[in-house]
Image (tube, helix red, strand yellow):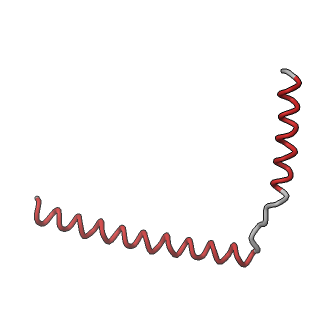
């Protein structure tokens, strides 16, 4: 390996460390609220897609077959 690669790698690691220090993590309350919203949306969309699948399956079995 050449010295140029090693110096670029060291610069990269130092810049990465400085960027990681800028991260702001959500609080426990924010995280809990986000998780609850995501879970509710997953259930709602699963119900919608399941209903649509049932309706289209019924229509297909009734009128096509």
Residue beneath the point at 16% across and 63% down = 61
Q: Looking at the image, is 32 positioned above or below residue 13? A: below
Residue beneath the point at 69% across and 72% down = 31
Residue extending furthest toward the top: 1
The quadrant holding residue 1 is top right
Q: Is residue 37 left or right of residue 11?
A: left
Q: Looking at the image, is 22 positioned above or below residue 52? A: above
Q: Position of residue 24 (x, y in %)?
A: 78, 66
Q: Is residue 59 left or right of residue 16?
A: left
Residue beneath the point at 86% across and 29% down = 6
Query: Is residue 17 or residue 32 the one in the foreground?
Result: 17
Residue beneath the point at 70% across and 76% down = 30
Q: Position of residue 14 (x, y in %)?
A: 87, 45
The quadrant holding residue 54 is bottom left
The quadrant holding residue 5 is top right
Q: Position of residue 27 (x, y in %)?
A: 76, 74
Q: What is the quadrant of the C terminus in the image?
A: bottom left
Q: Is residue 41 left or right of residue 18?
A: left
- Please count the marks in the image: 0
Q: Is residue 36 left or right of residue 56?
A: right
């Amino acid at each position: 390996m050449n010295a140029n690669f090693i110096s670029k790698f060291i610069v990269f690691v130092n810049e990465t460390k400085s960027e990681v220090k800028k991260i702001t993590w959500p609080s426990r309350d924010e995280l809990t609220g986000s998780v609850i919203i995501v879970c509710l949306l997953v259930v709602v969309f699963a119900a919608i897609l399941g209903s649509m699948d049932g309706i289209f399956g019924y229509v297909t079995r009734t009128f096509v077959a």
